Amino acid sequence: MKDIGIVSYGAHIPRFRLKTGDIARAWGKDPEGMASGLGIIEKSVPSADQDVATISVEAARAALDRCNINPQDIGAIYVGSESHPYAVKPTGTIVGEAIGATPLLMVADYEFACKAGTAAIQTCISMVKSNMIKYGLAIGADTSQAAPGDALEYAASAGGAAFIIGKENIIATINETCSFTTDTPDFWRRAGRKYPAHGGRFTGGPAYFKHIMSNAKNLMDLVKTKPEDYDYAIFHQPNGKFPVKVAKMLGFTYDQIKQGLLSPYVGNTYSGATMIGLASVLDVVKPGDRIFLTSYGSGAGSDAFDITVTNKIKDMDRKKAPLLSELIENKEYIDYAAYAKYRDLLYLE
Amino acid sequence: MRDVAVIGVGVTKFGELWDRSFRQLIAEAGAKAILDSGISGGDIDAMYIGSMSSGRFVGQEHIGALVADASGFSHLHIPATRVEGACASGGLAVRQGYLSIASGVNDVVVVGGIEKMNDVSGEAASETLATAADQEWESFFGVTFPGLYALMARRHMYEYGTTKKQLAEVAVKNHSNGALNPNAQYQRPIKLETAMNATMVADPLGLFDCSPVTDGSASIVLCAADKAKKFTDKAIKIIGSGQGSDTLALHARDNLCTLEATVYAAKKAYKQANVKPSDIDVAEVHDCFTIAEIIAIEDLGFVKKGEGGKAIENKITTLDGELPVNTSGGLKAKGHPVGATGVAQIVEIVEQLRGTADKRQVKNAKVGLAHNVGGSGATAVVHILEAM
């Protein structure tokens, strides 16, 4: 797999922000306690005209802005999300049309809770490897749902990132990837339901931690590495606490994870979470840097990646598209009432 | 009445046991107690199982027969009976086992207690626990147990000047003991400030004033005292057993600062055992909330009414205090799988009187007491044990 990797990348995060304390106040909870308990200061909120299709298009265009490939050379688009705008009708076709990649194109939408984006990367890797396509576009994006008043409401946010996978001019080589999957019902949304449900504390130990720990160890065994061999590490970030804890349990330091840890500032972007974390790391890496990424999707599974940055990163003008630090800073605060309106929480007749 | 002894004890780990099923837990605790006692399946005359609400927690009723079956005894057709008295289910099961031997009907009885509470959501667990209150006059109006015990705490503060700090001291002590118990749900000491400043649950009770939701099981083997030697040389005698009841609803009581059911049960147990509160060397009391431990040590006669808070503050009930209380970590730190609690309390007292409580061992413990409460005090059961 030495020759396959990331050709380009792009991300998008909606501008609106809602402070954790404002959500807590709306429900009569302790504002500071909720923010510090979850490790989330604020979360991104999509406006009325933003959805997974628009976020995916923004991210895909940002990825194309950073490289010189012809969109017609993209042979496949896979969009991972749990908030596709349509139950039936693909998001990927909208993206394909918007970036000019149609019609000789393979497309499908993916869903695997928070790890559908990394699953899309794995599919693109294998299709490039088998020479079925020249470039594949893998996207992870969400405008995640949460029932009003539920614990998830403090974290569920919006954002996404896109990665062009190929063999030529790769800025980062994906050395290895592996997955760990079981049938573990920690979080779900049944067909036709507006809000997801979850198993409370069951989402921790037997779900998030078991799958990430197992898969991260498997990958390090596979490529014979140790945590100290990596310059950066990214873990799925449903809040600001879990990724810090799982990193520590595995032997990674806070310095290794901080560049890819965005949940304190944007919340949990679900399928976008590890994807924007990786984009944030790619914003700052230099040749030779090694990156460890482990996603997690409820239901449950984890995808892990061992990545090495190549010399080609020097040829990329990363400023041709917004950096994550810019996307995070480009914000406008809204209150809970505006949030309720944008997220369709109000009953209107 | 014949004398009865505890000849075997067993307990599972307490905590969030996602990977263990209801029947695995009860079978494990039972097997440990049976192995500890030296009996074999053929020796068992009867089984009593305490469980508050297996139907709501895991969707399984008819657990008397289930427990005998899961323990591998279905072919022996042992009479197996479930006992229910809310959070006192375990203590009541112990008493039923005790009575059946004391009466001469049985010689060897296995008692189990179990609750698997984490298979439902926190809300469902609270709602299930609230079925132990008076549905018509309490639960339907929205009161759950933290609210009821908060009423008791407020009144105790008003009547006797009990402070939030004294409540917090109970949690600190029990966490400190739990840190020495390998089977406890929480095995870390906590700071007084942590308990004082914890998230408010029902004023004045904060998060650390409340026992947790727990999965776990405990079991003991009881035997007619004169036949105990046949199986073991480490038998511990039950010298007193008392049970009392009271109004189901808290507001119907004359006094919110005392549990009359506890006072009644304790009086019976002390009289039968022919001991005074001052003779007790170690006690496990029902601290479902910190205020409950303060009220319990008063009602059991360890201190005068109203002086429970002060006694906690003066460290009288710590592990190296005058009367160590809840050496296991109590319901607060060891965890509170409701149906298992009353049996687990006996397990701890037996360990203490045998001298096998390891880092939690109370020096020269000869007489121990276990106190188990159901609801807000509508049921209470007290057992007094003595080294033989």
Image (tube, rainbow, N blue to C red):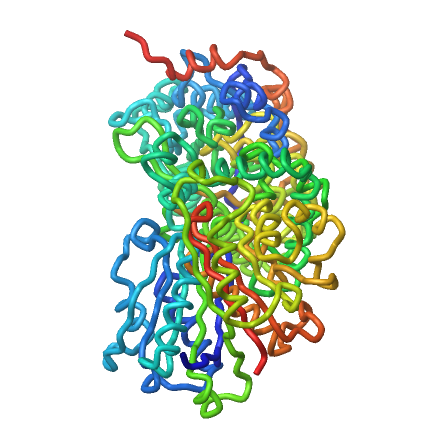
Residue B226 visible in image: yes
Query: What quarter of the picture does the N terminus of chain B occupy?
Result: bottom left
Whether residue A288 is visible: no
- Which residue is at 48% across, 56% downward? B264
User: Quick check: A336 above or below B280?
Assistant: above
Quadrant in the picture for residue A24: top right
Instruction: Please tell me how many numbered marks the rendered image carries.
Output: 0
Q: Point out residue B77 in the picture as x, y percentages from the top left corner.
A: 23, 78
Split into 4 quadrants, where in the image is the C terminus of chain B? bottom right
Q: In the image, what residue occupies the spot 46% across and 52% down?
A: B261
Q: Nearer the viewer, residue B2 or A181?
A: B2
Report the front residue among B312 and A109: B312
Which of the 4 quarters of the picture holds residue B26? bottom left
B112 up-or-down from A145: above or below: below
Q: Residue furthest bottom?
A: B230
Q: Residue at (43%, 56%) from the top-left corner?
A: B244
B303 shown above or below A234: below
Q: Position of residue B317 (x, y in %)?
A: 69, 57
Q: Nearer the viewer, residue A260 or A34?
A: A34
Residue B357 spot, x, y in % from top left: 63, 72
Foreground: A162 or B293?
B293
Q: Which residue lies furthest to the top in this view?
A: A349
